[in-house]
Image (cartoon, helix red, strand yellow):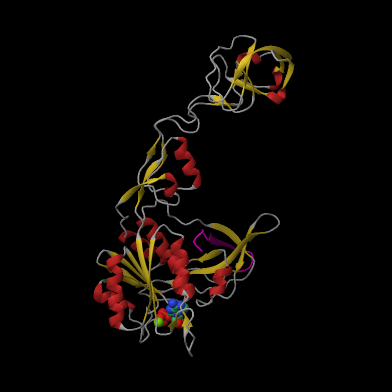
Amino acid sequence: MRASCADDFDAEALLFNQARQRILDEVTPVSGEEKLAIRQGLGRVLAEDIISGINVPGHTNSAMDGYALAGESLSGKSLETFEVIGTAYAGVAFEKSCGQGQCVRIMTGAPMPSGTDTVIMQEHVEKTNEQQIKIDCAQHRPGQNVRQAGEDIAKGDVVLAAGRVLVPADLGVLASLGIGEVKIRRRPRVAFFSTGDELRSLGEPLKDGDVYDSNRYALYGMLSRLDVDIHDLGVIQDDPDLMRDAFTTAAEIADVVITSGGVSLGEADYTKTILDEVGEVGFWKIAIKPGRPLAFGRIGKTLFFGLPGNPVAVMVTFYQLVQPALEYLSGKKNIEPFTVQAVTTEKIRKRPGRHEFQRGILSHDEQGQLIVKKAGMQGSGILTTMSRANCFILLSEQQGNIEVGEQVTVQPFNSLI
Ligand code: AMP
Ligand code: MG
């Protein structure tokens, strides 16, 4: 007898980690890069290592408004008098050299005058007159309030590595090196469509048994937050000829094709059969909940993900399996998910057999301890639970019921959902 979606053991199903690895093994990062102004590079994948041609800061300089002097002249314990020999401003070289018993009035960012290595904050000196100050030497240590040349970035450092997604701070770092343009990987092209005779577009009336096509909207939302070019191909009826055409057209324009629906064993579930005809099926059953039937394969060079139809299963399988593939495809490195341990405040029902991704709400109690509870009913059609959740509660294949107070592994949502 074939296993149905309600069974928890299925000898043919791949384990989640195996499936994820098999998918990643099929992915080769896109080739092709473009040179872009750094502002246009925000959120995109860097295609080259950025090596600094300069020290940042370029000069040893003052971190404060105050008085620059030689640290060794701070040896005394009591108030010491210093002669002020001039003022050093940011962006202006200070020509004179500072000797014994002397200091220089200095502004934040000004290069340290020759003979000085220490800055006393202006609030910490006693001003006798314009030419003279007194300092309580016991209160200060040599070398303080000075930014060393190259302390942020040294010439020759790899500042940003290829495969990094540029964040706002990186634009600042690049600018601080005087770099105005960088090489960026081209975006992967993703085509997606929904399948199902019962699906209606927004604005159409619903007849008995119809549902609005929500998967295309949730997929659009998640894809929009990834570094990919999106091609929305609409809804395709459960008709083998139409589906065959749609599969091949999509594969011609995209690096990745994503469909939803039609992967179960029902009469009108053609996704896997047609993938087999026009391409190759890699695997189609994974021991996960939700989302066990998922047809992964290729059409020519194009990767194909036939996601399930149920709206929560679509989001979970996209997040857990398609997202890493797209990130890897776009050239991104470090795609391992971030997880934390939290104490559950509710009993969680779970039968051993499948890896479950329950939708949860992560927060902390008054002591700062991370706690988690379920975000609502866990059915694979209950999309409002997904919308309310802020994390997945990850329950491995072997795990059974979890009691109140036990620790569970939690994966906080990233900015995708
Ligand atoms: P299927 O995998 O095609 O058997 O679909 C499983 C369930 O998901 C059915 O109840 C479908 O009506 C529903 N479903 C499939 N596609 C969509 C969609 N695009 N939007 C909303 N629900 C869908
Ligand atoms: Mg269907």
Q: How many marks?
A: 0
Residue extending farthest to the bottom is 208
Ligand 2 - quadrant of the structure image: bottom left
Position in image of residue 321 (x %, y %): 41, 64
Q: Which residues are magenta?
A: 403-417
Considering depth in this image, is 355 or 270 the residue closer to the camera?
Answer: 270
Q: Is residue 358 left or right of residue 157?
A: right
Q: Magenta stretch: residue 294 in it?
A: no
256 horizontally vs 138: left or right: left
Residue 354 seen from this side:
no
Report the residue at 31% width, 75% height from top: 246
Q: Position of residue 55 (x, y in %)?
A: 45, 29
Quadrant that contains the N terminus: bottom left
Q: Find out whether residue 411 is within the magenta segment.
A: yes
> Quick check: 7 above or below 192?
below
Where on the picture, by quarter, is residue 90?
A: top right
| Residue 278 visible to the viewer | yes
Depth check: 31 or 95 in front? 95
